[in-house]
Amino acid sequence: MRYPQEFIEKVSESSSLVEVISQYTQLKPSGGGFMGRCPFPDHQEKTASFSVSDAKQVYHCFGCKKSGNIFRFLQDYNGMNFPEALEYLADKNGIPIPQDNSENKDQNTLNFDKKKLMLKANKLTAEFYQEILKRAPNDSPIKQYVQKRKLKPETIEEFQIGFSPTEWESLSNHLTKNNISLELAEEVKLVKARKENKGYFDLFRDRLMFPIHSASGEVLAFGGRIHDQGEPKYLNSPETYVFSKGKVLYGLAQTAKYIRSEDCAVIVEGYMDLVSLYQSGIKNIAATMGTALTPEHAKLIKRMTTNVVVLFDSDDAGQAAAERSLTILLSQGLFPKGLILTDAKDPDEFIQKFGADELQKKIATAPELFSVILQSWTTDYRAEASQKVKLVDKIKPIFDSIQDPRLKSLYAEELSGRMNVSMDWLRSAFKSTASANNAPNNSQGRTFVMNENAIVVPALPSEIQLQNAPHVELLLLQLALKSRANFEWILNQPEPHTIKQIVSQITHLQVKELMEKIEQVYRQDVNKFDKFFSLLIEKIDRPELLFDKSNFTEFDIEKEQKFLSDTIKKIQQNFLRTQAKKLVNDIKHNKTGADNSVDVEKLKEFSDLQKNRLSLKK
């Protein structure tokens, strides 16, 4: 559902960026804003350089240069997408989420209410399991298992790991006491009805419990691991109205910020692998939950990074998972690498044997997943004709999935060398396979050019490009956005310094356009002026260009006006200098008359320009 702009603005205006960021770092008043240490995990600092403006609802780190508004912070730090961040803030501030006005309005309202109740039931359940584990005696089997697996108390707390007791109705009774109907609990797959309407029993019993969270921290479902002998080893929540395991990766609520910071996601296959890696210091991870990677998983990853290392077990199932995931990751424009562990059955065991540093080295040097798969498929390759044809047929779906023609060309060269065939033969073989199968190319109309001269013209970015703007023009933009008082001063300037004249003398087209937009916003609704900065920085290629330490210090109107006056004069001087040079060039190359005389009008124009330049200097 697309939310109306009025709703987005209401949520933005009702939310406090200072309050949200204060959950992750200590902020102290400083000048006109707040200062603290940068909360992002890739920026370890000893002195505060992270600034927050409560008035404008924007943040900027003068160390790592991260900038944004409240939505951007939740996206970058917690791994939410925009709708999730919007709904999270709306719920936090008690703002009703707009309902669909279509013919299905009543059904949509009912579903929304049901979703809230299901999430409430899951939250109560997670808290119940946590408390049961905390209260378990140290000599109990579950506590001994936790110690055996070397789970630290802080890890258990962070991931809200719990224990489902052995009794058949412990959770059922707890939910009933908290006014959760058992019919709803069955629908969210926490309990199951007995035959012949003889009550309900708990679905999870005698298991170490891993709550599965959404990016915003809501409990969607559970995974339960047996701690003694028994089958199945893992029991996962079935799919419900709030949970689809093909669309959720375990651990992202805790790890998304590290994936963004490292610009790489390490994908593992289970809860214990993720938790073990996380507490050993490898935190840019996510886990599938008893299912193969899906296109929805790949899309989730792409919101945070395009670089993926898929870490598989060394058994046949791990090899098969590697093969399935390659096509999916490539089809979403990701760059996958692969690591199949041969010295241990899974990542958790590898860390116990060799340590996290050794695993980190392997992750850092992981080969292309394409190369891993190709190596596996050509183990007994003897370059026989039939083998060549079979291998091309087998590998063609992978090539059809590749989004980037440059990557496709490089993979083709690797395949050509490994198969001992020419590029011309390979190109022809792929074409023949496509014709024989009558299968459409899955590359969404992109041209596949298998040579080193392939040229890719990327789509033009939708963001505002300010990187090459003149410094003085960026300074004017910065000052104009800094405060309403500054912009009012610019608007009230007399001839020849009116805002229209100033804007006409700006050389950078997008700075010029932004100044015009600022004026429009101000004249339409002066009360929205401060919020405009917060919305604007979402669109700028390098938001840090609009930040200066003075954005977050006490406002001195006299100093600001002097600074503005000097900045505007500098822009005008630059403009007049450029115009003067152009006139001189025109006069030199466009002499008139038989005596080669110069254009009198242009001389007069040049003289007037020089007078204006002198007056500005005075």
Image (cartoon, grey):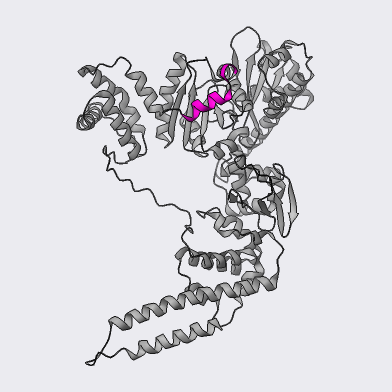
Viewer-proximal residue, 323 or 244? Answer: 323
In the picture as drawn, the residue positioned furthest to the bottom comes out as 595
The rendered magenta stretch, by its main secondary structure, is classed as: helix
Horizontal side, residue 537 vs residue 163: left or right: left
* Residue 407, placed above or below residue 609: above
Which stretch appears magenta? Answer: 352-365
- Whether residue 245 is in magenta: the answer is no
Q: Position of residue 553 (x, y in %)?
A: 70, 61
Image quarter where the C terminus lies is bottom right
Viewed as shown, does residue 450 lie left or right of 200?
left
Residue shown at the point (65%, 23%) measured from the top left: 210
| 363 part of magenta stretch | yes
Which quadrant is home to the N terminus? Answer: top right
Q: Quadrant of residue 32?
A: bottom right
Q: Nearer the viewer, residue 454 or 294?
A: 454
Where residue 208 appears, as percent x and y from the top left, is 67, 17
Q: Is residue 198 visible?
A: no
Q: Is residue 232 depicted above or below 491 in this figure?
A: above
Above or below 78: residue 539: below
Q: Look at 39% across and 24% down and name the residue there.
A: 372
Q: Where does residue 217 sit, x and y in percent of width and height?
A: 65, 34
> Taking 594 as reference, is 374 left or right?
right
Q: Residue at x 28, y 43 (%)?
A: 454
- Which residue is more in the foreground, 282 or 11? 282
Judge whether residue 433 can be spotted in this image: yes
Relative to 601, is 582 above or below? above
Residue in the picture at 69% in, 73% down: 558
